[in-house]
Image: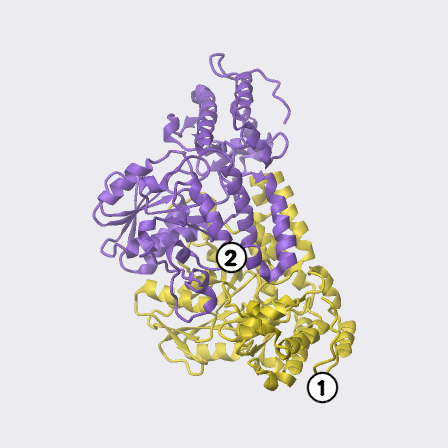
Chain colours: A yellow, B purple
């Protein structure tokens, strides 16, 4: 991307571009960016939708394909540890989310993972019929809950509130996304979990926008279950397998209905009746997609090089510089901030509302600044601290302001309704 | 593998090794082997467990990883058609299994796919409570049915018979694997489907050991549903996504409970309530694993170069040469044939029973002949007609006889109990 020739659109009292460059120079995580393969000049603020490509991934996949699959064929299941790959990746993810060892299962999609933990949660509270969640929760979570409730046919219902405050005595399980996919607002995991438990309910956390972006302490928060996504901040690649967590105290009683052969206590005994494997292994269903799983492992390994506290500190500084700059011009540009102003209260993204959000996002993409649009009117910018620079945050803010001021988005090509993404 | 120095262990009236070589020389499919990357000298008779690596796969994956994911990041969902990839692969698989266009959904595992179609089948026959299957069906199919029945809590039961003959009036759905994973015996799809329909039941076919190995005519047989595996004869790679089929006449009423956001009529509208996409698209749950799916597409493309009738003819000839040779020495070696002698009545594999099956399989693998063991006492040899040669079939038969005659398997290292595969 060509350097901006225009003067700064921000007041002199705010950080200048040179300040952002100085922050990059002093950034202890600056070298992490070298571990990723990013298109030259791109300002990529959509790692919360698809994480960037770690440089090591392509070579690892070639190895899995050519040497393992091609060279050792079926023997690779043992020789190259494919049979343990999901467990190994699960244990690595566990370290990123404050989970105990042997509590995280990987495979399937986030939606399927959610179905499994939701079914277990309901089964252990048969007298209670309510799944409590928020209207703004990510739709797939609501759809899966709806689907399970209808399937059970026992009067279960999904109750949606604006914000979980009180938890009634019919609530079997509270299901929330830790960091809101639109606003980036973050729930207090420990306090809501405690509230759920006090009300006799179990607690499921969706970590789609948390895992790999900020410290999560599932064990400390006494969460019952969690699910999360492999292709956002874990940089596992498009459609990377998802993960699920079950607290150790529930392992003995854990049962999930998608009981496939790889979750059997003795999968290769080919018994007629299902006997769940002990512990988290019982959460497995079928054979996991090994190629995608191998890519996910590289994404997770890349994160594990760095202390999560440092990532969080940088993420907060990145989002703060972007938010402060844009907010300084928001009123006159028709932008409305929707992310919490307090960095402690948000995840790693900043969102604004604008009546022309879709067209603005398109115009920014055309200039090399990738954020995304979320219906109906949200511009969302994710800041993956491993590879986004302070100068990217500054430039993105400037491009956003310029784009709206110059009304470049007001062109037919940017105003077409979004078709698929 | 070194050429065998020993004399032929078979009678002179049976095909000699030179005959097998002559069959290879005359084989119209001989060149297909060049499309695969196989370890030099290997005799790989386990393509029914993990299909071989197509040569084109590694390059395609590099492209998806480096150029698409790395180069265009999130824009690849549209720019490189990731959003349509599952549908595109589904339509290609449809051609291999006699299915109409827009009837095959790809993603998830075979187990999950089965759950979806089973749930729809039961929902449309609420007065009937029985899922009818066979004791010898692949365990995951039975486990998933058990799991669904228990979840529904409406008195559904899985009834297992030795062989489906009569179908009672409580049967909602008959669920069978087209080609038995142990014996290779093949069901008559059209006649059993007709029998199920006559009894008022729906019919689900598991095509794990059929798709890509032999002609399947789902539409002609009037099957209601099918599921199948991407990593066996479709050569999609380890844990490749599975597929499911729903007959067009059921599309309008089709509903499945694993209703994730990508099966929504408008996934990017982020609506609170689920509205299934029309047709087969409503069978989708979450985001599919794109890397694994891209590899699967290459596997399917490789198959589509060749007429299925030619593949079937070669598969029958391959299995017949192997079966005839081994059978000629079976009695004296303690082998008992378990696959149908009639090539029309079996799939693309030949299995034998032997009390030392596990040790024999291990000893064969040590000599470069890969088949597999299936508990409790089955030696299984799969003949993928795209890359297995007639001489491989002849050599494998000779190695098998030599191994048992010389009792090389009777060594401690071959007698250890199988741990995982």
Identify the residue at horizontal 68%, vertical 65% (top origin): A42
Is residue B208 among what the camera can see? no
Residue B49 picture location, percent across and down? 50, 40
Residue A32 picture location, percent across and down? 72, 64
Image quadrant of residue A406?
A: bottom right
Residue A351 picture location, percent across and down? 57, 76
Question: Which mark is on residue A11?
Answer: 1
Image quadrant of residue A173?
A: bottom left
Chain identifier of the residue bearing label 1 in the image: A
> A2 and B197: which one is in front?
A2
User: Of helix, strand and loop, which one carries label 1?
Assistant: loop
The image quadrant where one finds the N terminus of chain A is: bottom right
Image quadrant of residue A234?
A: bottom right
User: Of helix, strand and loop, which one carries label 2?
Assistant: helix
Question: Which mark is on residue B151?
Answer: none
> A165 and A399: which one is in front?
A399
Q: Mark 2 — residue?
A: B83
Check if mark 2 and mark 1 are on a common chain.
no
Chain identifier of the residue bearing label 2 in the image: B
């Amino acid at each position: 991307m060509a350097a901006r020739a225009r003067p700064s659109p921000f007041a002199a009292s705010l950080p200048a571009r040179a300040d952002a460059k100085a922050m990059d120079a002093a950034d202890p995580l600056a070298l992490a960016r070298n571990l990723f393969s990013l298109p030259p000049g791109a300002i990529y603020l959509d790692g919360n939708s698809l994480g960037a490509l770690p440089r090591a991934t392509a070579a690892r996949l070639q190895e899995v394909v050519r040497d393992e699959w091609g060279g050792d064929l079926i023997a690779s299941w043992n020789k190259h540890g494919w049979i343990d790959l999901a467990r190994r990746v699960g244990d690595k993810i566990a370290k990123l989310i404050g989970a105990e060892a042997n509590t995280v299962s990987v495979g399937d999609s986030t939606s399927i993972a959610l179905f499994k933990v939701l079914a277990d949660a309901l089964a252990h509270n048969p007298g209670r019929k309510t799944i409590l969640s928020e209207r703004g929760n990510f739709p797939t979570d609501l759809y899966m809950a709806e689907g399970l409730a209808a399937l059970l046919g026992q009067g279960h219902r999904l109750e949606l509130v604006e914000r979980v405050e009180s938890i009634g005595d019919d609530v079997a399980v509270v299901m929330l996304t830790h960091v809101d996919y639109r606003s980036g607002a973050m729930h207090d995991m420990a306090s809501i979990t405690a509230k759920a438990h006090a009300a006799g309910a179990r607690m499921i956390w969706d970590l789609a926008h948390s895992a790999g972006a900020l410290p999560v302490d599932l064990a400390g928060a006494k969460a019952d279950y969690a699910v999360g996504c492999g292709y956002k901040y874990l940089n596992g690649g498009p459609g990377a397998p998802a993960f699920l967590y079950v607290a150790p105290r529930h392992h003995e009683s854990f049962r999930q209905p998608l009981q496939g052969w790889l979750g059997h206590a003795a999968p290769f005994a080919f018994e007629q009746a299902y006997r769940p494997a002990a512990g988290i292994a019982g959460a497995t269903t079928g054979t996991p997609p090994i190629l995608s799983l191998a890519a996910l492992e590289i994404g997770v390994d890349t994160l594990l090089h760095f202390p999560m506290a440092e990532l969080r500190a940088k993420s907060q500084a990145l989002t703060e510089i972007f938010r402060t700059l844009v907010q300084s011009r928001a009123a006159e540009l028709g932008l409305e901030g929707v992310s919490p102003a307090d960095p402690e209260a948000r995840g790693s993204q900043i969102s604004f509302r604008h009546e022309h959000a879709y067209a603005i996002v398109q115009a920014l993409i055309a200039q090399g600044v990738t954020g995304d649009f979320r219906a109906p009117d949200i511009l969302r910018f994710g800041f993956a601290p491993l590879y986004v620079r302070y100068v990217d945050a500054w430039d993105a803010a400037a491009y956003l302001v310029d784009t709206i001021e110059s009304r470049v988005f007001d062109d037919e090509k940017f105003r077409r309704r979004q078709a698929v993404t």
